[in-house]
Amino acid sequence: MTSSNKTVGILTVDVEEWFHILDDPAVPKFADWDGLEARLPRNMERIFAILDEQKVKATMFWLGWAAQKNPDLVRQCAKAGHEIASHGFRHVLAYEEGREKFKDDIRHGKKVIEDIIGQEVIGFRAAGFGTTSDTPWFFDEIRAAGYLYDSSVFPAKRGHGGIVDFKLEPHEIKTSHGVLLEIPQSVIEICGKRVSFFGGGYLRISPIPLIKWGISKLQKEGRPAVIYIHPREVDPAHPRLPLKIHRRFKSYVNLRSTFPKLRWLCENYKFGLMRDYVKK
């Protein structure tokens, strides 16, 4: 029996490979990616299967490099009714890349995906939610690239990215190239501190009763629950990189919990697509 008969939020997938991790010297360089084991197809098939079984549609933020390597998988994703959005091309942090390189990356990623599916891509999410108060140009460049919405802001403190005083609810941002809808990652305030239970390591660590309570709190506040996972998180057997201790914990802790939690979310909640929040 579902916990909610109405749409509570958006289920999103950042579609990238197991080695697309940030902020550690052990992460393979872009030039080496082609020589690494590909596990994305089998992981995406597992995600597709549970979504199809539960009749859930998700918003898929495809990394352009991964889409270029797996065009048939992108088309399968679109044919199944999932929304195809962009995650850039090379999985770069905006505040490290700088404005010009970031601009080129997000435009290239958009074109690669559009050429594969033959449809316009209107949504974007930056790698690692990698926008900060030090990237004031960020939203201008996203809108200028032709995106209508963005879901890159983590409105709390985190290891990379994060804008601690950002609005919590979806809202329009006026840029020099038009209006951009920002749909931030979901966080809730507890005793004045912003915390998340809704994606990545946060989802893996959080027990189901806490996630359920958090979604209920978001509903009461009139905000969508934005859930995110990565394909590598449904694959506990994927290769491990020799990361530093803190990055190893964040990337690999409790991986076996991801798929059961994904199933529980799909069985108990109704999700919409991110594009449906955009005013045409």
Image (cartoon, helix red, strand yellow):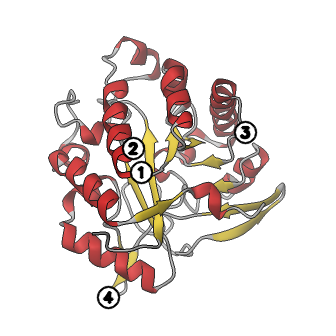
Task: Tell whether label 1 touches label 2 (CB within 8 Å).
Answer: yes
The span from disc 3 to disc 1 (Cα, nearest Å) is 24 Å
Q: Which residue does the numbered mark 1 point to in the structure image?
A: 55
The one of 118 and 162 positioned closer to us in this rendering: 118
> In the rendered structure, which disc, 4 or 1, sits on the residue that comes first in sequence?
1
Q: Which residue does the numbered mark 2 point to in the structure image?
A: 52
Q: Nearer the viewer, mark 3 or mark 1?
A: 1
Please provide percent x and percent y for residue 84: 58, 41
The one of 95 and 80 positioned closer to us in this rendering: 80
Q: Which residue does the numbered mark 3 point to in the structure image?
A: 120
Q: Nearer the viewer, mark 2 or mark 3?
A: 2
The kind of residue on which mark 2 rests is Asp
> In the rendered structure, which disc, 3 or 1, sits on the residue that comes first in sequence?
1
Q: Is residue 150 visible?
A: no
Please provide percent x and percent y for residue 188: 39, 77
In the structure shown, which secondary structural element does the residue marked by tag 3 occupy? loop
Q: Callout 2 environment at 10 Å: few (<14), some (14 to 19), or many (20+)?
A: few
Quadrant where the N terminus sits is bottom left
Q: Callout 1 environment at 10 Å: few (<14), some (14 to 19), or many (20+)?
A: few
Task: Tell whether label 1 touches label 4 (CB within 8 Å).
Answer: no
Residue in the image at 48% along x and 53% along y: 129
In the structure shown, which secondary structural element does the residue marked by tag 1 occupy? loop
